[in-house]
Amino acid sequence: MAQHSIDLALQGGGSHGAFTWGVLDRLLEDSDIRIGGLSGTSAGAMNAVVLASGLANGGRKGARESLTAFWKSIGRAGSRSLLRQTPLDALFEPWMPNGSPMAKFFDVMSRLVSPYQLNPWNINPLRNLLEKHIDFDAIHSLEEPKLFINATNVSTGHNRIFRNADIGLDALLASACLPVLFHAVEIENEAYWDGGYVANPALLPLIAESEPHDLILVQINPSERPGIPRTAPDIIDRINEISFNSSLNQELRTVALIKRLLREEEASGHSYNAALFGKIDALCIHRIEAQKEMSPFGASSKLNSDWSFMRRLHDIGYRTADTWLVNNRSSLGRHSTIQLLDDYAGGPEDGFAETTA
């Protein structure tokens, strides 16, 4: 069986990143798949860099072990968290720590008091975890996979992409810096917040600079939710989901419109700049998601880092990736498995609709 080289775009989403861990675990298990590039935001950035660090030091086995060790460490820390579920939560709203007195207190305080007041010493438990599990020197010298980690510049609102050579601890913390929880991360005299505000994750740098023709988006945040949210927390949760998906949708729309333009130009007999657009024209885009299984886990569960929850999300991700491979492996290198033009380029044009699996 031929080896398929793929790029991976990993969304952020707090502890829901354990779903992505499960997806990566399954993909790394498959020796016929080679990962050429990784773009990640927030938890997606951490998954990407932990994977690359493990890959550099121990191949596929090392990457899987590094991811498992990293998420186990998060799970151990979660077992001591003041925000963990109460027994009543577990009975009526599994995995959602809404009833925790500390969770309620923190939710209210985060809306009234800034982290500069609530957390004046800027304590971030992720710092020690990341230092323990990532070999940044190995990342800096790694030729493949290429890494693209993004953060939001607080002053300009622009996206900054960190690549292998300049990825360090602060870049990862910046990519996951929710401004209601942590101080902005300062790098080279610029302040940064979570990259999800501008790209979740960034697709265009990955497409432009990495070689594979297959890009797989691992999507955590549900793109659709039935019904109208009516409680204040549910409304805020849905606003955040829409906000963190909007930048991704815009990039997919850009790719779709370029593809549509190229096909129209080709059909009319016109030529185009192959060096500039050829890669996008040949690009096959795929999505691995588990919207049905993930949508019951509301936004508050993204703060639930209990190990049993991490394992559950991992197992959902692993099974989802396994099913995706069974159904779509033959599409790799041949065609997209999402309706890119239909969904993101304003509807299909005669002769231009993409074939899907």
Image: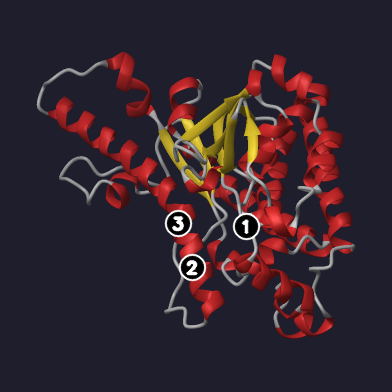
- Disc 2 versus disc 1: nearer the observer: 1
Q: Nearer the viewer, residue 236 or 356?
A: 236
Which residue is at 71% across, 49% downward? 22
Q: Label 2's element?
A: helix
Q: Residue at x 44, y 75 (%)?
A: 226
Q: Is residue 248 left or right of residue 281?
A: right
Residue 98: give its label.
none
The quarter of the displayed image where residue 162 is located: top right
In the rendered image, the vertical position of residue 172 relative to residue 321, given as above or below = above
Q: Quadrant of residue 189?
A: top right
* Residue at mark 3 to residue at mark 2: CA–CA distance: 8 Å
- Provide the secondary structure element on which disc 3 rests: helix
Q: Nearer the viewer, residue 179 or 324?
A: 179
Rendered view: 26 above or below 86: above
Q: Amino acid at mark 1?
A: Val
Tell me which amino acid carries mark 2. Answer: Arg
Q: Is residue 206 left or right of residue 348?
A: right
For this view, does 216 lie left or right of residue 139?
left
Spatial CA distance of label 2 from label 1 is 17 Å
Circle 3 residues within 10 Å: few <14, some 14–19, many ≥20:
some
Name the residue carrying label 2.
Answer: 238
User: Which residue is painted at 25% across and 16% down in the image?
Assistant: 273
Q: Position of residue 151 (x, y in %)?
A: 56, 38
Query: Mark 2 vs mark 1: which is more N-terminal?
Result: 1
Residue 244 placement (x, y as % from top left): 49, 53
What residue did someone put label 1 on? Answer: 180
User: How many other residues sit within 10 Å of disc 2, few (<14), some (14-19) or many (≥20)?
Assistant: many
Residue at x 70% of width, y 33% of height:
170
N-term mark: 1 or 3 = 1
Q: Which mark is residue 243?
A: 3
